[in-house]
Image (tube, rainbow, N blue to C red):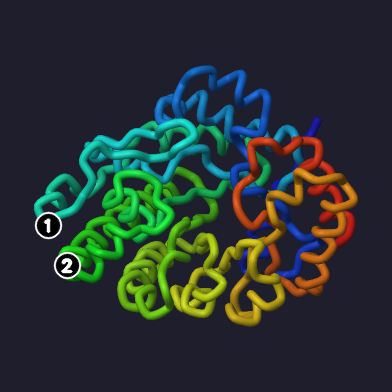
Amino acid sequence: MSEAPFNDRFLRACRREPVDATPVWFMRQAGRSLPEYRELRGDADVLTLTRTPELAAEICLQPVRRYDVDAAILFCDIMVPIAGVGVDVRIVQNQGPTLAEPFRTDADLSRLRPIEPEADVPFVMETIRLVRKELRIPLIGFSGAPFTLASYLVEGRPSRDHTNTKALMHREPETWGRLMDALTGMMITYLRAQVEAGVQALQLFDSWAGALDPTDYERHVLPWTTRIVDGVKDLGVPTIHFGVNTGHLLSLMARAETDVVGVDWRTPLDEAWGRIGEEHGIQGNLDPAACLGPWEVVEAKAGDVLRQAGGRTGHIFNLGHGVLPETDPGTLARLTDLVHEETS
């Protein structure tokens, strides 16, 4: 039997080229909503799984076997490169990344150093190589954006208000700049290594940037985000920039010049695209909670997203954030088929 052809629908949409149907993938499509993931994981934490390439590769491939998605995403965590350079970070179940000793002063910056991916996180590179052998769809690599990484380092745990992070930003702008410089340099090296290992697109997660007002985002975040995008541009792979609750920042986020901007569900997709500009692709943006409702609700909500996209090139269908743990995998399978059928 001949090998299935490579499906490049997702990559074409990233570049705003015509596609035969709107591509679909889901943030957190691998992991906690899948019973096979829960069985494989057992009592292991996320960092343990990511450090075992055979397990991480299997987890990445599990949703690809279930759903007719148009892209896979590396199974990893944004804090992995931080842990890789020796920072004592732990991923606590139902809580997230935690540090026993948060970064609060200029002296704490000595705990960061340039990353050497093949030495510090070789398991990530091996996972990429293993997954690429199995896939006939693109593999997305990713990293955290400097602000979101900094917020975990400074707060020491997930935060709703990011008070300590903002205080450092305003009280010690030079220290803040050095922290962002260090994280930016690390992420450029890390992302470039992922591409060299085989990923075919990159997503930058700035999950907590929505906590900032436009002035602070433009002054204290955007220059470093732009530097990361510039630092991988010569590799020729599409880039995606995503944050949560960033409707008020979308026009600024677009200035980082990624190929695609991801949007959450709080801003209607057509309004978001207007702020981003149609020279960029857009990714999103079904409310993940809609997938917990009856199929009629999912169908109607997905239809709203597709109508707002209006058949324009450059739309990648996704949720407005990650798949919720309670989501029925069967719903995501039907949703993927629905989007393909409605747009083909």
Picture coordinates of residue 215, whole percent (x, y): 37, 80
Quick one: 11 or 336, which is closer to the camera? 336
**Crowding near pointer 1: few (<14 within 10 Å), some, many (20+)?**
few
Question: Do labels 2 and 1 touch, CB within 8 Å?
Answer: yes
Up/down of 222 relative to 92, above or below:
below
Q: Is residue 193 visible?
A: yes
The residue lying at 35 percent from left, 49 percent from top is 190
327 relative to 109 in the view: left or right? right
Q: In which quadrant will I find the C terminus?
A: bottom right
**Crowding near pointer 2: few (<14 within 10 Å), some, many (20+)?**
some
The circle drawn on residue 106 is 1
Q: In which quadrant will I find the N terminus?
A: top right
Q: Which residue is mark 2?
A: 172
Picture coordinates of residue 236, whole percent (x, y): 49, 63
Picture coordinates of residue 85, whole percent (x, y): 24, 40
Which residue type carries mark 2? Glu
